[in-house]
């Protein structure tokens, strides 16, 4: 699996998990959803992704 696909899968999972936590636990989890969305938006404009850099350091191939 490529780094891009891993980033998208993790971001999507984080969003779904935080939405579930917001529904069942506390609405404050929506801030985490907003944080993930903001990171995806800045990735679209800047091309910088902290998770992609971390994955590269861990040895995941492009």
Image (cartoon, helix red, strand yellow):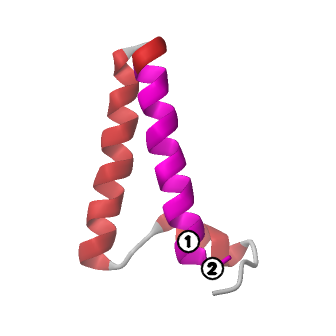
Is there any visible trace of residue 15 in the rendered image?
Answer: yes
Q: Provide residue 46's location: percent of width, then percent of height.
A: 28, 77
Q: Secondary structure at mark 1?
A: helix
- Residue drawn 28% across the image and 65% down it: 42
Mark 1 vs mark 2, CA separation in Å: 5 Å
The part of the image, by quadrant, that contains residue 9 is: bottom right
Q: Provide residue 33's location: percent of width, then percent of height.
A: 37, 39
Q: Main secondary structure of the magenta part?
A: helix
Numbered circle sitting on residue 59? none
Q: Provide residue 52's location: percent of width, then percent of height.
A: 55, 72
Residue farthest top in this picture: 25
Quarter holding the C terminus is: bottom right
Q: Residues within 10 Å of mark 2 (few under 14, many from 20)?
A: few
The part of the image, by quadrant, that contains residue 47 is: bottom left
* Rendered position, 4 above or below 14: below
- Residue drawn 40% across the image and 26% down it: 29
Q: Residues in magenta? A: 1-22
Within the magenta stretch, is there residue 48? no
Residue farthest bottom in this picture: 62
C-beta proximity under 8 Å, tags 1 and 2? yes
Residue pointed to by mark 1: 5
- Residue drawn 52% across the image and 75% down it: 4
Q: Provide residue 31's location: percent of width, then percent of height.
A: 33, 32
- Residue drawn 28% across the image and 53% down it: 38
* Rendered position, 5 above or below 34: below
* Rendered position, 1 above or below 50: below
Residue pointed to by mark 2: 2
The part of the image, by quadrant, that contains residue 30 is: top left
Is there any visible trace of residue 25 in the rendered image?
Answer: no
Residue farthest left in this picture: 45
Q: Secondary structure at mark 2?
A: loop
């Amino acid at each position: 699996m490529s780094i891009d696909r891993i980033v998208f899968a993790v971001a999507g999972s984080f969003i779904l998990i935080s939405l579930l936590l917001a529904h069942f636990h506390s609405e404050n989890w929506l801030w985490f959803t907003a944080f993930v969305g903001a990171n995806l938006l800045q990735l679209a404009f800047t091309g910088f992704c902290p998770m992609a850099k971390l994955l590269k350091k861990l040895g995941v191939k492009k």
